[in-house]
Amino acid sequence: MLGAFTKVNAAQLPADSLLQSRVTEGDFLDCYRAKCALPARVAADEVTRFPDWAQVLVALRNKLVAPLGLKGASDVEDAHAGVDHVGIFPIEAQTDQEVIAGFNDHHLDFRVSIYSTGEHIYLSTWVHRHNLTGRLYLATIMPFHVLIIRDALRRVAG
């Protein structure tokens, strides 16, 4: 219940985040933060442990995009077998302060950063869209993305 009252704020991607090197003009980038003292990896494991309602949305997404040739969870896991994961996302980089996870697809490249200062957790999403499908996809999922991200931060902070 306490998590429902946790304050989640829009924030700037930390200047020393490994995600900074990916950001180019025209890319999508958002960042939210909440007060939380968890280490980055512990927070990353929790952030990617989707609640039931979010799992339903992801399963629906996978069914809807399969005919378009976009990757689903099993495709990502198969393509990155043997790589450490947080949830379904393969880890690209990990330090004591930050975990970067995500993958590339035909329509867009996606990474999420879970960054810990020891006082706050920053949850950032970077997307580089390759084509019209990527732009339409991002526009379609954006309301759900914001709900899932804000809920994830409330859960790690609560």
Image (tube, grey):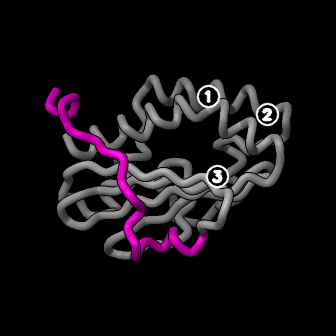
Q: Quadrant of the C terminus?
A: top left
Against 9, residue 65 (above or below) is above
Which residue position is annotated with label 1? 59
- The stretch of residues the image draws in magenta is 1-22
Against 94, residue 32 (above or below) is above
Q: Quadrant of the N terminus?
A: top left
Q: Is residue 66 left or right of residue 10?
A: right
Q: Is residue 149 left or right of residue 145?
A: left
The percent coordinates of residue 32 (x first, y second) are 37, 49
Mark 2 Cα shell of 10 Å, populated few (<14), some (14-19), many (≥20): few
**Looking at the image, do the residues carrying marks 2 and 1 touch, with CB atoms under 8 Å apart?**
no
Which residue position is annotated with label 2? 66
The percent coordinates of residue 134 (x first, y second) are 75, 44
For the residue marked with disc 2, what is the amino acid?
Ala
For the residue marked with disc 3, what is the amino acid?
Glu
Q: Is residue 34 left or right of residue 17?
A: left
Q: Quadrant of residue 56?
A: top right
The percent coordinates of residue 46 (x first, y second) are 34, 47
